[in-house]
Amino acid sequence: MTKKEVRKAANQSILNGKTKQETFEELKTTSHRSEKDLAKIIQTIPSLRARKKYKVLNIILIVLLSLTVLFKMMAGLPIIIENGIKWFPIVFLLPIINIWLLFGVITYRPHYHRMVAVFAILGLFQLFGNMVGEPFEPLIIIDFSIAAGLIGLGFYLNSKLFTNYLTVKERYQNNQGQTKLRDVIKFED
């Protein structure tokens, strides 16, 4: 199986209600991939329990990202008013990264939650750079609040939805009756 096929099969198994551990054990024999590669693929899929537990926080992150898309689209309106309707595509071009991140968060794609936080941090640097030497505007508090929410929720949800797996040593007896140790992969949730 290709990596894409394994990911699709693992995602379907988890959506059918199996745990990450059950999915791992099931795909270990059929995927023809190393256990570590398979574990890394399954690690990037949030469990149903995690999706349900952090659903409200994910929705808040989606709302905050949607606000940033809306604000960036509104920032393109003066360009259209000044230069005419032929500049209308710029309204959708300005928030393209935010739309891409929004899609990733909605579909629980791996690493998108973290990328939201990273881009929010970069946006804060830009905001600080634009503030130097300018008088304080109360509306800037809204920008800081949205950025803080994006950063906090992005990193937090990334750590909670995409949990790590553990490699533990387990004793077993081989065919000759000797006791040996082998690595066994266990998922946290």
Image (cartoon, rainbow, N blue to C red):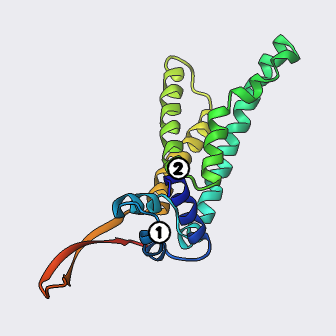
Which labelled disc corresponds to residue 153? Answer: none
Give the mark nearest the N terminus, 2 or 1.
Answer: 1
**Looking at this rendering, what residue extends furthest in the front direction?**
176
User: Judging from the image, what secondary structure is the residue with disc 1 in?
Assistant: helix
Residue under label 1, please give it. 30
Q: Is residue 115 above or below residue 79?
A: below
Asked whether, in this view, residue 69 is left or right of residue 18, the answer is right
Looking at the image, residue 19 sits to the left or right of residue 71; the answer is left
Depth check: 58 or 131 in front? Answer: 58
Residue 122 x, y percent position in the rendering = 49, 32
What amino acid type is highlighted by mark number 1? Thr
- Determine whether label 2 and label 1 are within 8 Å by CB: no
Pointer 2: what residue?
A: 113
Q: Is residue 125 left or right of residue 93?
A: left
Image location of residue 116, percent across then percent down = 54, 43
The residue carrying pointer 2 sits among few (fewer than 14), some (14 to 19) or many (20 or more) residues within 10 Å by Cα, namely many
Which SS class for mark 2?
A: helix
The C terminus sits in image quarter: bottom left
Name the residue furthest right.
85
Badge 2 amino acid = His
* Residue at image point 48% right, 47% down: 114
The answer to which of 100 and 98 lies nearer the viewer is 100
In front here: 84 or 107? Answer: 107
Name the mark nearer the viewer: 2 or 1.
1
Q: CA distance from mark 2 to mark 1?
A: 30 Å
Q: Callout 1: few (<14), some (14-19), or many (20+) C-alpha neighbours within 10 Å?
A: few
Q: Quadrant of residue 37?
A: bottom left
